[in-house]
Amino acid sequence: MAEPEATTKTPARKKPQPEDQPFAEFVPRLLMPAMTQACATHGGSAPALQLQEAPMPVVGCRCWQIQGELPGPRRFWLCFEQPDINSRKTFALAESGQEPSLLEPFLIDEKRTSLALLVARLVQRLDGQKWLGPN
């Protein structure tokens, strides 16, 4: 009796997730447009967004950050300690003409960050501040 041949199957490769892209591609191409669209969809104005490496609000150490401005002028900062969306993140905001005085931890309990999670929590935070939509 002949023994059946062992077939070697290579496991199917997982489709790369958007979050697997390098930080410098993911943030301007996917995250920032999604943030703009989500804020506008939630009833607010679309924020003017800018990605840059600059001193972190309040503490001054350099980091990558998305700086956003809404009418008012209301400003917010989403800071990444490293150029990696899974690195530690902080959030700051300031009302018209003032400087931020408090850094808040942002998504500290998440081991893996996704595009949807970043956008949803940012909108939730801005809406909690009553900066989006009719409140």
Image (cartoon, rainbow, N blue to C red):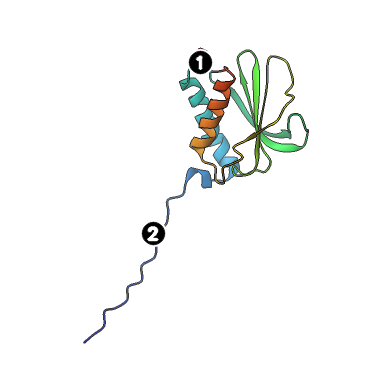
Q: Amino acid at mark 1?
A: Gly
* Residue at the (59%, 20%) spot, across then down: 129
| Residue under label 1 | 133
Image vertical order of residue 26 relative to residue 102, above or below: below
Spot the residue most to the bottom. Answer: 1
Q: Position of residue 91 (x, y in %)?
A: 65, 31
Q: Is residue 11 left or right of residue 47?
A: left
Q: Position of residue 69 (x, y in %)?
A: 62, 21
Spot the residue most to the right. Answer: 60
Which structural element holds mark 2?
loop
Between residue 122 and residue 73, name the one nearer to us: 122
* Residue at the (52%, 44%) spot, across then down: 19
Q: Work out whether mark 2 precedes mark 1 in sequence or the reverse, and give the earlier one.
A: 2
Q: Of the numbered discs in the image, which one, if any, rests on residue 77?
A: none
Query: In the picture, residue 90 is in which quadrant?
Result: top right
Q: Nearer the viewer, mark 2 or mark 1?
A: 1
Q: Is residue 105 left or right of residue 55?
A: left
* Residue at the (53%, 28%) spot, across then down: 35
| Residue under label 2 | 12
Between residue 110 and residue 57, name the one nearer to us: 110
Marks 2 and 1 in Cβ contact (< 8 Å)? no
Q: CA distance from mark 2 to mark 1?
A: 44 Å
Question: Where the N terminus falls, by quadrant?
Answer: bottom left
Image vertical order of residue 35 relative to residue 40, above or below: below
Counting the numbered discs, the total is 2
Which structural element holds mark 1?
loop
Q: Amino acid at mark 2?
A: Ala
Spot the residue most to the left. Answer: 1
* Residue at the (48%, 17%) spot, across then down: 43
Spot the residue most to the front. Answer: 109
Q: Position of residue 52 (x, y in %)?
A: 67, 33
Callout 1 crowding tier (Cα within 10 Å): few <14, some 14–19, many ≥20: some
